Amino acid sequence: MEQFSNNFREIGATTYLSPIPTVMLGCADPQNDIKPNLITIAWAGIVCSKPPMLSVSIQKSRHSHGIISSTGEFTLNLVGQELGKAMDFCGVRSGRDVDKFEALGLTAIPAPKLSAAPAVAQAPAFLSCRVKQIIELGSHDLFLADILQVSVADRYFQENGSIDEEAMNLLSFVHGKYRKVGSEFGFFGYSVASPEALARRQGK
Amino acid sequence: MEQFSNNFREIGATTYLSPIPTVMLGCADPQNDIKPNLITIAWAGIVCSKPPMLSVSIQKSRHSHGIISSTGEFTLNLVGQELGKAMDFCGVRSGRDVDKFEALGLTAIPAPKLSAAPAVAQAPAFLSCRVKQIIELGSHDLFLADILQVSVADRYFQENGSIDEEAMNLLSFVHGKYRKVGSEFGFFGYSVASPEALARRQGK
């Protein structure tokens, strides 16, 4: 067994899970006069199917941390190549200093099921989320949230009603870099699917 | 604002965060005579930078749930196209019925910092993880874990010491499908980088 171990190099205890999402979180707190803001999130993941839940992790010092701690709601906006530069900008500039929607020419729209958190009109899709629990972990607090609704831009629906995610030109995050997400490699269960099922899926 | 909202269709409360990882979790419990096992995990994400932590969510009924609840350790093995079919298989077959390492011709190797959980010798990289907390959410339990070490296969190191993640041909998970992760779109901070920094990065 050791011969294989020797073929690896240890690079230290680091956040190397790859690929991971890189999305824009939308929030606002109009009751406290805090305008719509966006922050880039790569520390995010699905955590439960029933109920549908996800997590995002945010540093306490971030402007958005205070907003969603107070309002308990946010949107997660998927990011394709068209929004890539805006997404990067939202990760390195603070909403305390700049109105990111205005600076980036993005449009804040209401999100289904939420009262304050805006979605990004230009996003290919977004999830409406409500915070259920906050857990302190260290540099980041973990927000566990229910997914209340998912909205997908009209232009990605195909005639048969399915969604063309390939056309979204999504971006992923891999060790400090954004990488393009492209063509389909397979579908869940394809390795054990019957020839009939494979033919049906490939015909789609 | 409404004109934009009307350009979205609501598809319900579903786990649509995209792209997300699709990796193989390795575990074993030799003290209880349970052989090395692999399970595919898409419900995973980074949750903290300091300390470096990640989460995985697993249904209580799964074989691996019992193993890592008992041993408190696992590996997460990154998955490229070469391992795609094996990864899919590990998500639809149970380790109670089949020895997945054997069935798939994969090699279990020891993982740094762990005593029992195996890594996959053929993986491009793997993370050694120790469970810190388990939170019941519904269909899935959330395992919060420290990342203890990261091991990257020798063949992905370039002469300058950097890692060529593009060569890993990683796969992502998007709404029931595996999608290829490809070329670099940008690096964290590129939208505000100086011309000098941009030139330096592009020269790499």
Image: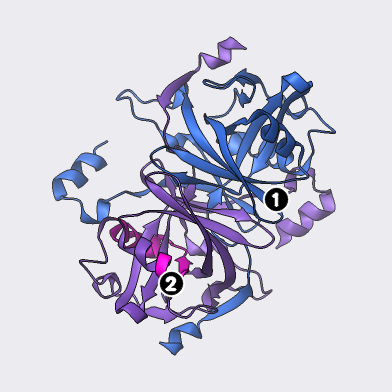
Chain colours: A purple, B blue
Q: Are marks 1 and 2 on the same chain?
A: yes
Secondary structure under badge 1?
Answer: loop
Q: Quadrant of the N terminus of chain B?
A: bottom left
Q: What residue span does the magenta drawing correspond to?
A: A69-91
Instruction: Identify the residue at the far bottom of this view.
Output: B2
Q: Which label number is shown at residue A201?
A: none
What chain is tagged by disc 2? Answer: A
Between the residue at mark 1 and the residue at mark 2, the CA separation in whole angstroms equals 36 Å
Q: Position of residue B172 (x, y in %)?
A: 55, 48
Q: In front here: B102 or B137? A: B137
Residue A174 in sight in this render: yes
Q: Which label number is shown at residue A71?
A: 2
What amino acid does circle 2 point to? Thr
Quarter-wise, where is residue A148 in the image?
bottom right
The magenta stretch spans residue B107? no
Lower sequence index among marks 1 and 2: 2
Secondary structure under badge 2?
Answer: helix
Q: Quadrant of the C terminus of chain B?
A: top left
Residue drawn at the location 36% of the way across and 43% of the way down: A176
Residue linked to disc 1: A188
Q: In front here: A27 or A109? A: A27
Q: In front here: A106 or A137? A: A137
Left or right: where does residue A85 sit relative to residue B99?
left
Compared with residue B200, is residue A32 higher up or lower down, i.e. above or below? below
- Please, what is the dominant secondary structure of the magenta stretch? helix
Q: Position of residue B161 (x, y in %)?
A: 33, 25
